[in-house]
Amino acid sequence: MLKRLKILISFSKSERVGLAVLLVLLAWFIIWPHLVPPPQSSVMDMDEFKRRIDSLSRLPSLEDDNEPSFTSVYQRKDHYKDYKKYEKPPINYVHFDPNTVDTQVFEQLGFSPKQAVTIVNYRSRGAVFRTPDDFKKVFVVSDEHFERLKPYIRIDTAALPKLLPRARFDSLRYPKREPRIVEINTADTAELRWVNGIGAFTAQQIVSYRKRLGGFARIEQLREIRGMTDERFEQIALQITLDTTSFTRIDLRVADEAILKAHPYIGAYAARGILLFRRMSGAEACTIDALITNNILKKDVAEKLRPYVESATSPSEQVD
């Protein structure tokens, strides 16, 4: 006890005051619950509860008004009849000439009203269906739907001469010009448009893709251009030549990520793989064959890329 008093006396004056205040507060919190009476219960008397329920039952009902209730409004069909989904009528397969029939006939053949209008508008711009297969060129005509309609297509060939003078649609897209051979790696968009089968949009697509590639190594690469069909490729291939002596190549040993991922045959994912492989194995080990072996590039894609890789052709091979 004496030892504890010595410890207390050793406190400074401010420490003893703080200790006293703390003890007073502690005693207050202990005594307070015993001094304050507990709050009265807020539980409602049962008679009062019944009285309030009875008063609610005497309120006017929402159903007493002349206006229909919320539920009855949505039970009446006439309130949502304008929102019914379009229901296709049953298909009536009949023989038809796509050059002359109206939208009503197209709807009977299974097209929606919007699709029927699209076909008529396509025809009004000068398109003429010379053969049944021409009808398949309309983008709203799916392959499956065309196969069902093909046996019913009857084109009046005798009336075609009257329709052909107004058929300017194909000539506007692909104007017929004098045959001219164009070198595809150096021609600009104006020169490319001299090729039958290449319009303004396709010419721009060819130049843009050529820039991304660094030049065309094979004529078959034109098939990779968006919208290039086999029919158009066969038409174009007869009118172009290809000079492969000069086009941009990539040095896999030093090319940065931006250059690698911009190439159509590499992309962002393979570009990161090439950079990681080059960092781990060294620049000199970064070859096409090494990238194939380490599954960074698929073999078929790597073979397409090989002509564009600077290390693919060694100086000795160039001399030979």
Image (cartoon, grey):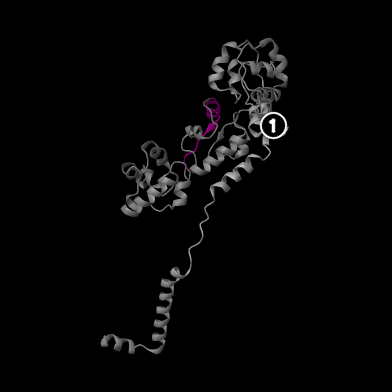
Task: Please count the marks in the image.
Answer: 1
Image quarter in which the N terminus is found? bottom left
Q: Specify the farthest residue to the front.
A: 47
Q: Is residue 276 left or right of residue 74?
A: left
User: Would you name the residue on which mark 1 appears?
Assistant: 68
Neighbours of disc 1 within 10 Å: few (<14), some (14-19), many (20+): few
Closer to the camera in the image, 37 or 108? 37
Closer to the camera in the image, 10 or 268? 10
Image quarter in which the C terminus is found? top left
Residue 45 appears in the figure: yes
Kind of residue at badge 1: Pro
Residue shown at the point (62%, 33%) measured from the top left: 199
Location of residue 14 in the rendering, given as x and y in whole percent from the top left corner: 41, 87
Residue shown at the point (54%, 31%) measured from the top left: 228
Residue 176 appears in the figure: no
Check the image and report above or below for 215 versus 229. Answer: below
Quarter of the rendering containing residue 291: top left
Residue shown at the point (36%, 37%) measured from the top left: 299
Location of residue 108 in the rendering, given as x and y in whole percent from the top left corner: 64, 15
Check the image and report above or below for 148 versus 208. Answer: above
Check the image and report above or below for 232 versus 24. Answer: above
Residue shown at the point (41%, 71%) measured from the top left: 30
Q: Is residue 295 shown in magenta?
A: no
Quarter of the rendering containing residue 305: top left
Q: Secondary structure at mark 1?
A: loop
Closer to the camera in the image, 136 or 186? 136
Which residues are the magenta region? 231-245
Location of residue 5 in the rendering, given as x and y in whole percent from the top left corner: 30, 87
